Image (cartoon, rainbow, N blue to C red):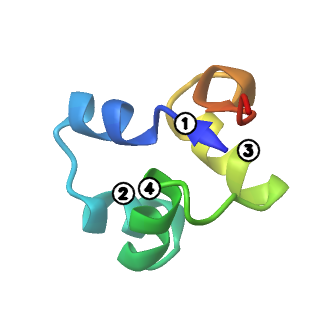
Amino acid sequence: MDNRLRELREAKGWSQGELAEQLEVSRQTVNALETGKYDPSLPLAFRIARLYESRIEEIFFPDVT
């Protein structure tokens, strides 16, 4: 799944560790999300969307293959 997570995080000036702390996940999880190696659970996707005051669909996009 493609996403805008890195772009949004960098716009806030947060490190992966800072974002991970806010989401209550590991920095490795944030890295895996940003690189597309891991798709978030629905509860995590909602937490991310709330943090960025966005809809899930504005952050995460299905792979177009």
The circle on residue 24 is: none
Q: From the image, tell me which residue sits under label 2.
A: 19
The circle on residue 35 is: 4
The residue carrying pointer 1 sits among few (fewer than 14), some (14 to 19) or many (20 or more) residues within 10 Å by Cα, namely many
Query: Mark 4 or mark 1: which comes first in sequence?
Result: 1
Query: Mark 2 or mark 3: which comes first in sequence?
Result: 2
Q: Answer whether labels 1 and 3 touch (C-beta < 8 Å).
A: no
Amino acid type of the residue that numbered disc 4 sits on in the rendered structure: Thr
Q: CA–CA distance between discs 1 and 2? A: 15 Å
Query: Mark 1 or mark 2: which comes first in sequence?
Result: 1
Residue 45 left/right relative to 29: right
Which-is-in-front pick, marks 2 and 4? 4
Amino acid type of the residue that numbered disc 2 sits on in the rendered structure: Leu
Rendered residue at 44%/79% (across/down): 26
The circle on residue 3 is: 1
Rendered residue at 72%/28% (across/down): 64
Q: Give percent across and percent down for residue 38.
A: 62, 65
Under circle 4, the secondary element is: loop
User: Where, by quadrant of the figure, is residue 2 drawn?
Assistant: top right
Q: From the image, tell me which residue sits under label 3.
A: 46
- Quarter holding the N terminus is top right
Amino acid type of the residue that numbered disc 3 sits on in the rendered structure: Phe
Q: Give percent across and percent down for residue 35.
A: 44, 55
Identity of the residue furthest to the front in this view: 65
